[in-house]
Image (cartoon, grey):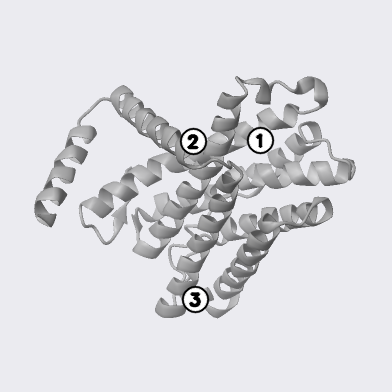
Amino acid sequence: MGRKRNASVNVLFQWVRGQSMKVKIFLGAFLALCSLVALKLWVKNHKYFFVASEAIHFLGIIVLIYKLTIQKTCSGLSLKTQELTAAFLVVRLVCSTIIEADIHTVLDSATLISTAWLIYMIRFKLKSTYIKELDNFRLYFVVVPAAILSLFFHPYTLQGLIVSVLWAFGGYIEAVSVLPQLRLMQNAKMIEPFTSHYVFALGISRFFACAHWIIMIYETSGRYLSMVGSGYLWILAAFLCEMVQTFILADFCYYYIKSYVQGQLVMRMPV
């Protein structure tokens, strides 16, 4: 039975692979829409989406910790992505602690501690296994634009301009933090399982966060994005950040699922 189901799914993937890009985009959009409808019907409090997003991100980090602890290697991991992750988590923790400490603060703290451990291991303990030549994404390509955008598009908070700008900066950095990891995987061409599990967890994490925004926009008939007069142009910018993150990771998630269904232990990135 298991073989028959696996064969059927393989046939489905082969069929999808043979379709045009327009058909693939339509099928992906349809699947995402069905998932959003299911989430809207089953989850009444949409704030849980962000909790799920942060929890899944933390689980992805735990997968990497397991890899480094058991295999004693950090090959395939981008130090720059972990540094960007630590940067936006520090900024978000500072802001959330000032504004209102809650469950998000706890989850971000756990993720930051885990990320800091990863950075320490890659920089010092497992330095000989880190392939610096493949991790060649230039951070100023994302840090400088994020800093500039945060000066012009940021939320208005009672805590003042500095907190507002910092919060926006963290959001923009988060949106592009996975780019160095994807660049490294493209350079390496092949991705070992633990790294691919981690990036897939990031993709699922971003989907939950993006689902929150889309459902809120739907329930308010678009008014959620049009509160410009109240100083909330930031809402539109934040939504676009979520969409950017989701689309960046969507293609990877497709190839991850395809590799898993086909029983490939090592995932290959398309040229």
Label 2 sits on what residue type? Answer: Lys
Q: Nearer the viewer, residue 39 or 225?
A: 39
* Residue 256 image offset from top left, x and y in percent: 33, 50
Drawn side of residue 168 relative to residue 107, left or right: right
Identify the residue position indicated by label 1 in the image.
238
Nearer the viewer's eye, disc 1 or disc 2? 2
N-terminal label among 3 and 1: 3
Question: Please, what secondary structure does the residue beneath circle 1 have?
Answer: helix
Identify the residue position indicated by label 3 in the image.
128
| Residue at the spot 55% in from the left edge and 80% down from the top edge | 125
Crowd rating for badge 2 (residues with CA inside 10 Å; few <14, some 14–19, many 20+): some
Label 1 sits on what residue type? Answer: Ala
Q: Can residue 247 be spotted in the picture?
A: no
N-terminal label among 1 and 2: 2
Identify the residue position indicated by label 2 in the image.
40
Label 3 sits on what residue type? Answer: Ser
* Residue 59 in the image: above or below residue 96: below
| Residue at the spot 38% in from the left edge and 56% down from the top edge | 188
Q: Nearer the viewer, residue 235 or 89?
A: 235
* Residue 241 image offset from top left, x and y in percent: 61, 36
Cα distance, mark 1 to mark 2? 21 Å
* Residue 255 image offset from top left, x and y in percent: 32, 46
Q: What is the quadrant of residue 231 in the picture?
A: top right
| Residue at the spot 23% in from the left edge and 57% down from the top edge | 264
Drawn side of residue 183 relative to residue 148, left or right: left
Nearer the viewer's eye, disc 3 or disc 1? 1
* Residue 25 in the image: above or below residue 189: above
- Indicate which disc residue 169 carries: none
N-terminal label among 3 and 2: 2
